[in-house]
Image (cartoon, rainbow, N blue to C red):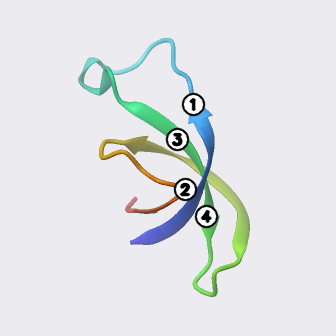
């Protein structure tokens, strides 16, 4: 599991039909020591994430 901080949302005009209605978040990765890393990724929010989240890749 990895830790990340939510930085915003991602809007998609075309996506896989099985992902219809799914919210996408732009998240900034957090290191093992709690420092923000310069790396970002997009995460599918299927449970209603708060300001920070755990994710797998």
Residue 55, image quadrant: bottom left
**Labelled disc at residue 51:** 2
Say few, some or many: other residues with alpha carbon within 10 Å of mark 3 (under 14 / 14 to 19 / 20 or more): some
Q: Position of residue 48 (x, y in %)?
A: 36, 45
Which residue extends farthest left? Answer: 18
Residue on which disc 4 sits: 29
The Cα atoms of the two marked residues, 3 and 2, are separated by 11 Å
Circles 4 and 2 in contact, beta carbons < 8 Å? no
Q: Which of marks 2 and 1 is nearer the N terminus?
A: 1
The Cα atoms of the two marked residues, 4 and 3, are separated by 12 Å
Residue on which disc 1 sits: 10
Q: Position of residue 12 (x, y in %)?
A: 51, 20
**Labelled disc at residue 25:** 3
Residue 42 shown left or right of residue 30 in the figure: left
The Cα atoms of the two marked residues, 4 and 1, are separated by 16 Å
Q: Which residue is drawn at 68% across and 59% down?
A: 39
The Cα atoms of the two marked residues, 2 and 1, are separated by 15 Å
Circles 4 and 3 in contact, beta carbons < 8 Å? no
């Amino acid at each position: 599991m990895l830790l990340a901080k939510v930085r915003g949302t991602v809007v998609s005009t075309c996506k896989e039909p099985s992902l219809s209605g799914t919210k996408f978040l732009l998240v900034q990765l957090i290191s093992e020591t709690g420092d923000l890393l310069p790396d970002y990724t997009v995460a599918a929010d299927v449970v209603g994430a708060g300001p920070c989240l755990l994710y797998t890749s």
